Image (cartoon, helix red, strand yellow):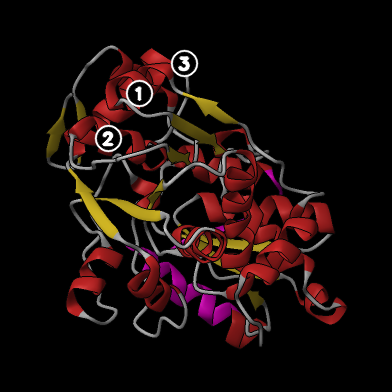
């Protein structure tokens, strides 16, 4: 999907109007326990309450709504670690567009079934998001499908940036936003919008400490490949693309810090949200809370934490709630 498009506060405000009929304005919930432990107000932005259980619906809705009629006729394809595919499938069904979603074999079965239930065709390809993207590229080249990238596209980024508009409209005093970080579409949109509205605000990205592609790329000064491994934060897996056009540059310029978490820390974040807040949250959605609980992030004022998704295997989450060990490949994890 190639577009000529500016990415700024104006385009993000326009995206808020575009996505309003498909995505919902999610609550910003006070966390009494986190606020007490921090000494500052902590607010949870509950993207878990989107129709598909994750923030990705915002970018997908913005991108698909802007397709021309002849593009809609060709159908769309995307590569995903799960939530983007679910978002594209949902928005495509709402708009009457045929959708194919390419997933690696690392994507949990619960996310595969959810995508299929929305009417999309699923193709399982390879052991990484990059390998799944090759299948999406083939469908574009051979069948004329329109590619809807998971993050590196201005329409996608603008859609995700609408989260920051909602946060600062409701709580302008917030001075730090903690954001799950994978390919960078979410944090890029939030950073562009939030820093345009409030230049002093801090934007902190949170990733797992194994296979964090954006962190590795920022450290290298250019996009690099990483090995994908099983993680509780499976939605944060995948590369950023060696030909990254948007998110690497935005993260390099506007993200103030990136924090890496162990699987044990992510486990504790998921457990805290379940047991203390009563929230069903996937590992990637829990990393902002996990980062605060770990002590690796220090805040000096009101903070917003993006709780980005709830699409977790419930058997896994219930085991975490009971503080039982979880097997991730050869790694055994327990809080």
| Mark 2 to mark 3 CA distance (whole Å) | 18 Å
**x, y percent for residue 224:** 25, 77
Mark 1 element type? helix
The residue carrying pointer 3 sits among few (fewer than 14), some (14 to 19) or many (20 or more) residues within 10 Å by Cα, namely few
* Quadrant holding the C terminus: top left
Mark 2 element type? helix
Out of 98 and 149, give the one closest to the viewer. 149
x 65%, y 45%: residue: 169
Out of 45 and 220, give the one closest to the viewer. 45
User: Which of the numbered marks, if any, corresponds to residue 292?
Assistant: 2
Magenta span has 132?
yes
Say left or right for 215 vs 304.
left
Closer to viewer: mark 2 or mark 3: 2
**x, y percent for residue 186:** 49, 58
| Mark 1 to mark 2 CA distance (whole Å) | 8 Å
Tell me which numbered mark, 1 or 2, is placed earlier along the sequence: 1
**x, y percent for residue 65:** 78, 65
Tell me which numbered mark, 1 or 3, is placed earlier along the sequence: 1
**x, y percent for residue 163:** 59, 50
**Residue extent of the magenta highlight:** 118-139
x 68%, y 38%: residue: 51
Q: Circle 3 sits on which residue?
A: 278
Magenta span has 102?
no
Q: Are marks 1 and 2 in contact (CB under 8 Å)?
A: yes
Q: Circle 1 sits on which residue?
A: 34
Out of 263 and 15, give the one closest to the viewer. 15
The image shows residue 120, relative to residue 216, as above or below, that is above
């Amino acid at each position: 999907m190639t577009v000529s498009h500016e990415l700024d506060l104006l385009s993000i405000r326009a995206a808020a109007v575009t996505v309003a009929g498909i995505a919902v304005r999610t609550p910003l919930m006070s966390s009494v326990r986190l606020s007490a432990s921090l000494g500052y107000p902590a607010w949870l932005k509950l993207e878990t309450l989107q129709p598909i259980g994750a923030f990705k619906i915002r970018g997908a809705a913005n991108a698909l709504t802007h397709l021309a009629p002849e593009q809609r006729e060709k159908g769309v394809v995307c590569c995903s670690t799960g939530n983007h595919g679910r978002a594209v499938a949902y928005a495509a069904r709402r708009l009457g567009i045929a959708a194919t979603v390419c997933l690696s074999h690392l994507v949990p079965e619960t996310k595969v079934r959810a995508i299929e239930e929305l009417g999309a065709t699923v193709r399982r390809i390879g052991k990484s998001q990059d390998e799944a993207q090759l299948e999406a590229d083939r469908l574009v080249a051979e069948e004329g499908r329109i590619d809807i990238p998971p993050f590196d596209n201005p329409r996608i980024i603008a859609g995700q940036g609408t989260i920051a508009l909602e946060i600062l409209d409701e709580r302008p005093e917030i001075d730090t936003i903690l954001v799950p970080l994978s390919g960078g579409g979410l944090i890029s949109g939030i950073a562009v919008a939030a820093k345009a509205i409030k230049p002093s605000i801090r934007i902190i990205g949170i990733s797992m400490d194994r296979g964090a592609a954006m962190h590795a790329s920022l450290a290298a000064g250019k996009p690099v490949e990483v090995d994908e491994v099983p993680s509780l934060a499976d939605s944060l897996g995948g590369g950023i693309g060696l030909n990254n056009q948007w998110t690497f540059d935005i993260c390099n310029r506007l993200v103030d810090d990136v924090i890496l978490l162990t699987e044990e820390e992510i486990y504790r974040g998921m457990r805290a949200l379940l047991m203390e807040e009563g929230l069903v949250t996937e590992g990637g959605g829990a990393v902002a809370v996990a980062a605060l609980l770990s002590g690796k992030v220090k805040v000096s004022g009101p903070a917003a934490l993006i709780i980005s998704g709830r699409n977790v295997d419930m058997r896994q989450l219930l085991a975490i709630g009971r503080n039982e060990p979880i097997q991730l490949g050869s790694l055994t994890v327990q809080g």
